[in-house]
Image: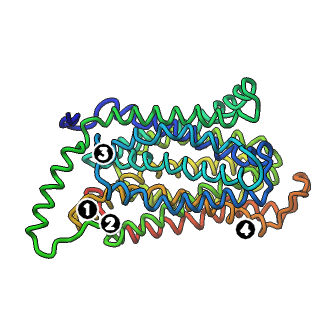
């Protein structure tokens, strides 16, 4: 029996709790961010060359596949509970098992490296599809810009809150499992536990979205009706999901603008430890910076819907990017004043998180624009592009950070207390000036390339 019933407006659970799955997702992904390299070097005992190959192959494959998940959701037949909603429960249950395998070493040499690489690739396939389906449901359930921003804002509140919670819960979970199971198994156990929370959260989203999307039977009936119309129409257009990108120049400029934001995010986060160690002369300040930035992110996520309601999503993002560039540039002129720089870069990260809540609304406008031009639904294809700039940022992170350190003539043998002025200025430029230039480029691209109105 179809479980769909007409829903008018957003339910209270969606307004308050949409994002609990993203809360678990953030906890889960942070295990990879903070512990994967340590596990590979200290537990699995892989050489640096092998680690580079493992991480590069998995990251490149992940980035390539991320371009295909959206078209995949649009092209295949809808599942029992809907084209997108069904995927909130179809694959998340696999993630705890596949993800834990990433932190297990079986055998030695090439076999062990292949095992870990396969685990990294398959676990990301299992979580990326429901992740994109989850974001796509914002466009399905939110019928107005206000409703979509409400969902996006609530989701980002939960995501930012997870980053705050992780700063304590992540290391604590690893310590507890290490005491119970030994350090060798602690990381796999933590990955399993946090990804299980993600799966449970997506199951909660599945229930919250009940009635907001057509079921399999209903969509197949609609598609059958459309097929009959196509048969009677001469020169009818064939459904091609990737045409959603080709016909929409606004989407291309939005996509490029988002890439600049994630370059800034990973560059700032990656160089923060170098700034506080070699310029601030106090590496412990990194913890303070991360905690403060994440806490401000919760506030930014909450207030974003009110700001967008007043200025629209595009204006909010463009003005925010310009403001980030100004603040980061100003911080560079006081780079020797550690607390001033910390406050300024916390403000930059606050504004960056605020713009994250605007992205689903901007991409939703593009999905509506492409759908109108093509005459069929391309929500999955367009919303799936939300994840690709993140993947590109991850791939470019190591290259950019290495380049910045090379320009600063960084050496691991340098005593932080003896850091030269050239080294300090070089690190500060990578931490502040380069992000300012990159995000300014993103502002210009979005301002002049993306010309869709919020009501499109």
Question: Under tag 2, what secondary structure?
Answer: helix
Q: From the image, which quarter does the C terminus lie in?
A: bottom left
Give the label on residue 79, or none: 3
Residue extending furthest bottom?
A: 235
- The relative height of residue 314 versus residue 280 in the rendered view (above or below) is below
Q: Characterize the local packing of mark 3: few (<14), some (14-19) or many (20 or more) Cα atoms within 10 angstroms.
A: some
Q: Nearer the viewer, mark 1 or mark 3?
A: 3
Real-space Cα separation, disc 1 to disc 3, in angstroms: 21 Å
Q: Are marks 4 and 3 in contact (CB under 8 Å)?
A: no
Q: Position of residue 243 (x, y in %)?
A: 32, 69
First reached walking from the N terminus: tag 1 or tag 3: 3
Question: Under tag 4, what secondary structure?
Answer: helix
**In this orientation, which residue lies closer to the viewer: 436 or 257?**
257
Real-space Cα separation, disc 4 to disc 3, in angstroms: 46 Å
Q: Position of residue 376 (x, y in %)?
A: 23, 61
Which residue in the structure is indicated by mark 2? 244
Which residue in the structure is indicated by mark 1? 371
Question: Under tag 3, what secondary structure?
Answer: loop
Q: Are marks 2 and 4 in contact (CB under 8 Å)?
A: no
- The relative height of residue 40 versus residue 367 in the rendered view (above or below) is above
Residue at the image point whose x is 35% and y is 46% from the top = 149
Give the label on residue 403, or none: 4
Residue 242 is left or right of residue 411, and the answer is: left
Q: Are marks 1 and 4 in contact (CB under 8 Å)?
A: no
Give the label on residue 452, or none: none
Q: Are marks 1 and 2 in contact (CB under 8 Å)?
A: yes
Residue 174 is left or right of residue 356, and the answer is: right
């Amino acid at each position: 029996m179809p479980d769909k019933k007409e829903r008018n407006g957003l339910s209270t659970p969606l307004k308050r709790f949409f994002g609990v799955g993203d809360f678990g997702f953030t906890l889960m992904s942070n295990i990879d961010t903070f512990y994967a390299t340590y596990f590979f070097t200290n537990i699995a005992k892989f050489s640096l060359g092998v680690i580079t190959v493992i991480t590069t192959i998995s990251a490149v494959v992940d980035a390539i596949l991320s371009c295909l998940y959206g078209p995949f959701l649009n092209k295949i037949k809808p599942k029992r509970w809907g084209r997108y909603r069904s995927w909130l429960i179809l694959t998340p249950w696999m993630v705890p098992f596949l993800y834990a395998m990433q932190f297990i070493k079986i055998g030695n040499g090439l076999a062990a490296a292949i095992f870990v690489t396969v685990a990294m690739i398959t676990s990301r396939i299992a979580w990326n599809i429901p992740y994109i389906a989850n974001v796509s449901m914002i466009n399905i359930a939110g019928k107005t810009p206000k409703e979509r921003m409400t969902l996006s804002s609530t989701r980002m509140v939960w995501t930012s809150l997870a980053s705050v919670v992780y700063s304590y819960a992540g290391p604590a979970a690893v310590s507890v499992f290490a005491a119970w199971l030994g350090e060798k198994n602690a990381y796999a156990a933590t990955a399993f536990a946090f990804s299980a929370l993600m799966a449970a959260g997506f199951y909660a989203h599945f229930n919250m979205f009940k009635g907001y999307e057509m079921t399999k039977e209903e969509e197949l009936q609609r598609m059958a009706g459309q097929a009959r119309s196509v048969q009677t129409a001469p020169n009818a257009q064939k459904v091609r999901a990737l045409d959603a990108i080709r016909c929409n120049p606004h989407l291309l400029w939005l996509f490029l603008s988002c890439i600049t934001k994630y370059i800034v995010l990973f560059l700032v986060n990656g160089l923060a430890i170098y700034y506080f160690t070699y310029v601030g002369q106090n590496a412990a300040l990194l913890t303070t910076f991360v905690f403060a930035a994440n806490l401000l992110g919760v506030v930014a996520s909450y207030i974003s819907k009110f700001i967008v309601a007043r200025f629209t999503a595009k204006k909010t993002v463009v003005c925010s990017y310009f403001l980030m560039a100004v603040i980061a540039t100003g911080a560079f002129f006081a780079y020797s004043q550690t607390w001033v720089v910390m406050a300024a870069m916390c403000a930059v990260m606050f504004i960056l998180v605020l713009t994250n809540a605007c992205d689903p609304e901007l991409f939703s406008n593009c999905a509506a624009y492409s759908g109108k031009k093509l005459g069929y639904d391309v929500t999955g294809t367009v919303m799936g592009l939300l994840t690709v700039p993140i993947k590109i940022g991850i791939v470019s992170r190591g290259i950019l950070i290495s380049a910045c350190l090379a320009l600063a003539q960084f050496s691991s043998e340098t005593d932080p207390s003896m850091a030269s002025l050239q080294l300090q200025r070089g690190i500060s430029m990578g931490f502040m000036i380069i992000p300012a230039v990159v995000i300014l480029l993103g502002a210009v691209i979005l301002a002049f390339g993306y010309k869709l109105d919020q009501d499109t």
